[in-house]
Image (tube, grey):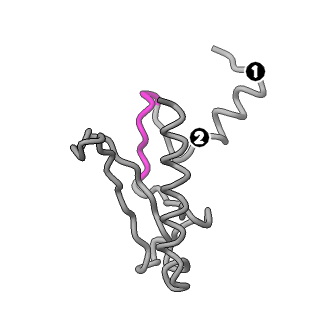
Amino acid sequence: RKLGKATWWKSRYMSAGMINNEGVNVDLYIPRKCSATNRLIQSSDKAAVQINIAHVNPDGVYMGDYTTMALCGFVRKMGESDGFLDRLWTKCYEEHSSQI
C-alpha cells in the first residue's frame, strides 16, 4: 500500500518512540515531560518525581482512574512544586468536571 507524502511524513515523524508493525511501542526508554514547565525530564534528574492522583467519587471511594503528573527537579528546587501541582490539578479537575 502506497502512502501519500503527508501521510508518510506524519507516520514517520509525528509518533513518539519506535513502534513496530503491530502498533506496539518497543522503545526501552521514553522520556517524560514536566507537567509544569513542559521541559523534558532527563534520565539523570534524580530530583524529578511522578505523582498519580486518584479519582474518587463524591463519597470518597476510588473509581479506578488516576491522573499522572511529573515534576522536574528544577521546579522542586525552586520550591514551587506545590503551587504548580495545585494549579495543574485545579485546571485538570475543571476540564474533567465540564465533560460530565
Q: Quadrant of the N terminus?
A: top right
The residue range painted magenta reads 21-27
Q: Which residue is mark 2?
A: 15
Which numbered disc, 2 or 1, marks the residue that appears first in the sequence?
1
**Callout 2: helix, strand or loop?**
loop
In the rendered image, residue 23 lying in the magenta stretch gets the answer yes
Q: Main secondary structure of the magenta part?
A: loop
Amino acid type, residue under disc 1 in the picture: Gly
Q: Residues within 10 Å of mark 2 (few under 14, many from 20)?
A: few
Vertical order, 86 against 65 (above or below)? below
Vertical order, 84 against 63 (above or below)? below
Residue 71 position in % (x across, y down): 48, 68
Q: Residue at x 57, y 65 (%)?
A: 36
Q: Residue at x 35, y 55 (%)?
A: 53
The residue lying furthest to the top in this view is: 1
Residue 32 position in % (x across, y down): 49, 60
Name the side, left or right, on which 12 lies relative to 71: right
Residue 20 position in % (x across, y down): 46, 35
Q: Which residue is mark 1?
A: 4
